[in-house]
Image: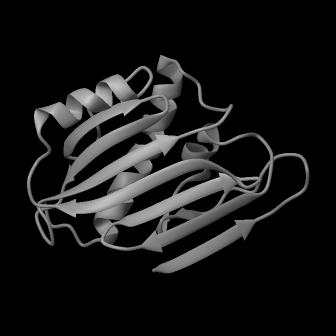
C-alpha cells in the first residue's frame, strides 16, 4: 500500500486550504464549507484496488472519499441505501453525467467514464461538528462534488 500524507498547517485562526485532494485540484471555496473553521489540515491517500483519500483536521477525519472504477451501474438497492444513510439525501442533478445521491453528510455517485471503465464510483463521507444536517449542508456537499468529480474523471482519462 502506498500512502501519501500532506500536512498543511497555519496559525490558530482559520485553516490553510489544500489546493488538491486525491491528487486533483479543488477550489478552496468548494472545500472550505465542508471543514471546521480552524485546525491543522492533513490530507492522505492510500492505494489498493480502489483509491481512498482522507482529509483530517487536527487529527480528526473530516472527509473520506473512496473512488472505484466499475463496469456496471449500481443496483437500485444501493441507491435506496444511500438515500436512507445520508442526512437530507436525495437523487440530484449534477453538471457531470452520471447518477448522484447527495446528502449533507455524504454521497454516492457513479459518473460516466466510458474508458478505462464504464463508470467511476465515488463513496463520500463527511464527519464532524461542521456538518450541517440540512438542505444547505447538502448543497455545500454538492458544490464540492461539482468541482471534484469532473477533475477526477479527467485525471483518469475518462472518454465518456
Q: Position of residue 136 (x, y in %)?
A: 52, 21
Q: Position of residue 19 (x, y in %)?
A: 60, 63
Q: How is the image coloured?
A: one colour
Res 102 seen here: yes
Q: Which corner quadrant of the image does residue 17 belong to?
A: bottom right
**Residue at figure coordinates x 38%, y 67% from the top left:** 51
**Residue at figure coordinates x 44%, y 37% from the top left:** 106
The residue at the far bottom in this view is 2
Quadrant of the frame with the C terminus: bottom left
Going by the image, does 73 lie left or right of 95? left
Q: Is residue 105 above or below residue 144?
A: above
The residue lying toward the viewer, choosing from 23 and 46, is 46
**Residue at figure coordinates x 12%, y 69% from the top left:** 115
**Residue at figure coordinates x 39%, y 45% from the top left:** 146
Res 90 seen here: no
Q: How many marks?
A: 0
Quadrant of the frame with the N terminus: bottom left
Q: Is residue 103 above or below residue 21?
A: above
Q: Position of residue 65 (x, y in %)?
A: 44, 53
The residue at the far right in this view is 12
The residue lying toward the viewer, choosing from 32 and 56, is 56
Going by the image, does 11 lie left or right of 25? right
Q: Position of residue 132 (x, y in %)?
A: 59, 25
Amino acid at each position: 500500500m502506498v500512502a501519501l500524507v500532506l500536512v498543511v498547517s497555519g496559525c490558530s485562526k482559520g485553516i490553510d486550504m489544500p489546493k488538491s485532494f486525491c491528487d486533483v485540484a479543488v477550489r478552496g471555496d468548494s472545500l472550505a464549507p465542508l471543514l471546521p473553521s480552524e485546525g491543522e489540515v492533513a490530507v492522505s491517500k492510500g492505494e489498493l484496488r480502489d483509491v481512498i483519500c482522507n482529509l483530517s483536521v487536527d487529527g480528526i477525519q473530516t472527509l473520506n472519499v473512496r473512488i472505484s472504477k466499475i463496469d456496471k451501474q449500481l443496483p437500485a438497492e444501493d441507491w435506496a441505501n444511500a438515500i436512507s444513510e445520508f442526512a437530507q439525501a436525495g437523487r440530484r442533478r449534477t453538471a457531470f453525467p452520471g447518477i448522484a445521491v447527495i446528502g449533507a453528510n455524504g454521497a454516492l455517485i457513479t459518473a460516466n467514464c466510458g474508458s478505462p471503465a464504464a463508470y467511476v464510483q465515488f463513496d463520500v463521507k463527511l464527519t464532524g461538528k461542521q456538518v450541517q444536517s440540512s438542505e444547505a449542508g447538502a448543497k455545500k456537499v454538492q458544490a464540492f462534488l461539482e468541482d471534484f468529480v469532473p477533475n477526477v474523471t479527467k485525471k483518469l482519462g475518462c472518454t465518456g
